[in-house]
Amino acid sequence: MNDTQKNLPSLLNRSFVLVTFLGWLYFFIFHSFLLLPIRISDLGGTEKIVGFVMGIAGLSTLVLTPYAGSITDRYGRKLFMLLGFALLAASTFPLAFLDRIDYLYYVIRMVHGCSFSLFFVAAGALTVDVSSEKRRAQALGIYGVFTIINYAVAPYVGSILIKNFGFDFFIFFLTVIALLGFGISFIIREKKKAPVPKNIERSYTDCLRDRVTFVSSATLFICGAAFITTLNFISIFSLSINIENFHVYFISYTFSVLAIRMFLGWVPDRYGKWRVASPFVFFLGLSIFALGFVYEIKLLIFCGIIFGCAHGFVYPSIYSIIIESNPKEVRAKAFAICSVSFTGGGMLGSFIFGVVAELFGFRTMFFSIGFMVFLGFLFFIRSSVLKERKI
């Protein structure tokens, strides 16, 4: 640890630890749904149907998140973390009783998206509230570690439970975890919200008029489309090329993110978020483009490592840029912009690239996603306003 790190305030306060643990519980459940494409395929769903079922959650997230940001700033974080867990439990349990793909799958996934909006915005805003401004990117990174780790843990545990006890047991297990998170959320403490002065209050349009916020959220939209679509399809892509241990991609991705966030999470705060994020947007696209050439498990693991390293820097850096470009009184709105950008990109990406995969194959899909991210990289690095503000 260098002198710069020693002089920074500690992150390990009660509120930060609690919200991080609850984030881990929530995203264990949410990332377990990465196994749904296999279930959908077993029930006769095509790649297009997989894309629509997985992506439809993003539609409700896209619609609800802006409102979630406003009400979270107004009424506090705890209430909406509770509602997030409650909705997740209520919408997960019915999956055990569905034996065909019909409209109920889409309804359930839309409720999943509503749950995500409420929990993610509330927990993210609380994380920002309880962390020091000097360690914000690191705090978001560490919080992200305990959500992202479930990209490895949840599919691995889920695949074991399904193999040994069946899909229905797996769904009941997830429901119990959601109820546990709901109960623990009651012990959250938060400061009473002061009213936002009229001269500071901002609408979403006002926030997006700021060029830094606009450029960063547009880049985040592209990265979200790439990130979520890739994770939605990696399991069935791997099975299509006879790699049954598809979870190694999630594991390699997760461990590389862990390494970045735990040991290098301070880098964006010290050297500048834009300067650090820029090259790793490029590497994010490169790691996805390379999936088009994967034929064996070693290459799949390698792609997962690069994918994780890139995401480990890009995600907290761009989130921090957007949050710090807006007044602290509207942090939940700023976090909502981040969520809408990332999740909205994932929704649209899943829809579009699911069709691409069905018509032209998975390899063409990954090539197309990689090219899209390269264009996003060029857009991001050419923004002079980000360089001028030295973010």
Image (cartoon, rainbow, N blue to C red):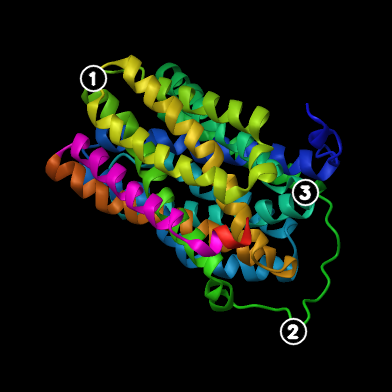
Q: Which mark is residue 134?
A: 3
Disc 1 versus disc 2: distance between alpha carbons? 58 Å
Find disc 1 in the rendering and name its residue: 295
Q: Which residue is mark 2?
A: 199
- Disc 1 packing (10 Å; few <14; some 14–19; many ≥20): few
Q: Main secondary structure of the magenta part?
A: helix
Task: Look at 47% across and 22% down and name the residue there.
Answer: 252
- Three-letter residue code for mark 1: Tyr
Query: Where residue 13 sits in the image (x, y, percent)?
Result: 85, 40
Secondary structure, mark 2, is loop
Question: Can you tell which of label 3 and label 2 is closer to the viewer?
Answer: 3
Quarter where residue 5 is shown: top right
Quadrant of the drawing holding the N terminus: top right
Q: Which residues are magenta?
A: 361-386
Q: Is residue 324 left or right of residue 59?
A: right
Instruction: From the viewer's perspective, tell me whether residue 151 is left or right of residue 245.
Output: right
- Kindly identify the residue that appears in the image at 60 percent across and 65 percent down: 68
**N-terminal of the two: label 3 or label 1?**
3
Query: The disc labelled 2 sits on which kind of residue?
Result: Asn
- State whether residue 273 appears in this view: yes
The CA span between labels 3 and 1 is 44 Å
Instruction: Tell me residue 41's x, y (percent).
Output: 25, 35
Q: Residue furthest left?
A: 359
x then y, percent, for residue 24: 64, 36
In this rendering, which labeled residue sits more in front, label 3 or label 1? Answer: 3
